[in-house]
Amino acid sequence: MRKLLTMALLALIATGAKAQDSDSTKSNKPVFTTVKALPITSIKDQNRSGTCWAYSTLSFFESEILKKTGKTYDLCEMFIANKDYMDRAVLTVRMHGDSQFSQGGSAGDVLIIMKEHGICPETAMPLPGTMQGDSLANFNEFFSVMEPYVDAIAKNKAKKISNQWKPGLQGIIDSYLGKCPEEFVYEGKKYTPKTFMASLGIDLNDYVSITSYTHHPFYTKFAVEVQDNWRWDQSYNVPMDEMMRIIDNALDNGYTIAWGGDVSEEGFTRKGLGILYDTKKAQSLTGSDAARWLKLSATEKKSKLDSLGVNAPEIVPTQQFRQDGFDNWELTDDHGMHIYGLAKDQNGKEYYMVKNSWGEYGDYKGTWYMTKAFVAGKTMDFLINKNAIPKDIRKKLGI
């Protein structure tokens, strides 16, 4: 009987603890108030493809067109991917395989493709995935065919290779992504990709990339040394505080941002938040001392951190924090998204509103709320309209 009473008491204590945890989690759940939300186009889903760079950057350009002309377009990600993968394969072959060939890319890829080849609307090509019987983009089979093909050419032992590998590869790309149209009809008018690009009302020379690191001089340009920046596209280098000023000034003046950065951290939740967790301070808030914290599994740690919600302590990022993270591989080039607004939680903390390309996923139907600390600490680089940059910074950059 005593054993049963003891077990019952423990059960009540556990139930009470769970109730307290549940109440705490609820009270910590963010309640957002929108400060500013700039116009964006519909949420898309990249599905099983590593094309966030294409989705986020085209979303950015769709907002740029909307701002400039008032017109809404759905631009074609697979047109960009088709052209980009051939360009990347050519470089890989020229480098005899000493250049990574993969699904990833950067905002600069999209800008360069649009300058060189133009663009087409989504309706001018097959929908993503339909070439292989899927309803959404699925690159699993596509890349399992394409990667060994490119590798076989790039590492061929022959003294001389023919150019026949190019039409062969183009056939693979077209078979999975659809053939890029040479001309098409849109809203009753005939276009080529280049004339369609010219009709959109934006000047592609207005766009620049911004980053912030100390291993290159500030107010100069350099190619951020990450694998997916395979074109060695250059970014303007500014101090971290000015990088953040550029983002805020852009939003204040109606401009959005094509953001690239690190989402591999614990603070980037699958529920729709980006928080730069200070795990040392968080240990005590979750009732865990250092010894107990170390015994928790990664899943248990993440659950406890996520339960803190808006009250989670954050690291105050510095220029050195960014540089250390880049140099030791903690700040990685993982994902591209589209910053389009600003919000505050119930504590008054500010968050950037960020459009993702995972469909209407997460608690906020495809939007992520990333704190300013998270963005300051985890930005790799971003593409922006140069007219969105404060005048004093533009002067320093000479643009």
Image (cartoon, helix red, strand yellow):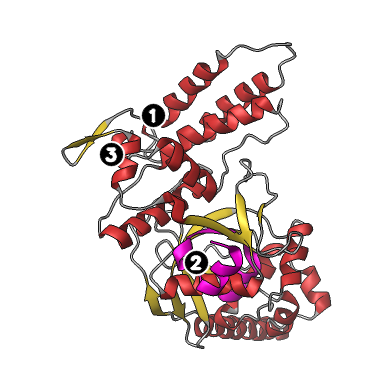
Residue positioned 64% across, 86% down in the render: 13
Q: Nearer the viewer, mark 2 or mark 3?
A: 3
Does the segment drawn in magenta span residue 379? yes
- Give the CA separation, mark 2 to mark 3: 30 Å
Q: Which residue is mark 3?
A: 123
Report the disc number at residue 272: 2
Spot occupied by residue 216 in the image (x, y as percentages of width and height): 74, 59
Residue at the location (55% across, 74% down)? 392
Q: Dividing the picture into quarters, in which one does residue 214 lie?
A: bottom right
Give the CA distance from mark 1 to mark 2.
32 Å
- Please say whether residue 16 is visible from this viewpoint: yes
158 to the left or right of 77: right
Dot placed on the residue nearer the N-terminal end, 2 or 3: 3
Looking at marks 1 and 3 on the same chain, the residue that comes earlier in the sequence is marked by 3
Amino acid tagged 3: Thr
Q: Is residue 121 visible?
A: no
Give me the C-alpha separation between circle 1 and circle 3.
12 Å
Q: Residue furthest bottom?
A: 347
Identify residue for label 1: 178
The picture places residue 122, in percent across and down from the top left corner, at 32, 41
SS category of the residue bearing label 2:
loop
Report x, y in % for residue 280: 76, 78
Describe the element under mark 3 as helix, strand or loop: helix
* Amino acid type of the residue that numbered disc 1 sits on in the rendered structure: Gly
Please state if 11 lies on the left or on the right of 367 as rendered.
right
Quadrant in the picture for the N terminus: bottom right
Residue range in magenta is 372-399
130 or 98, which lies in front? Answer: 98
Question: Compared with residue 310, is residue 77 higher up or lower down, i.e. above or below?
Answer: above
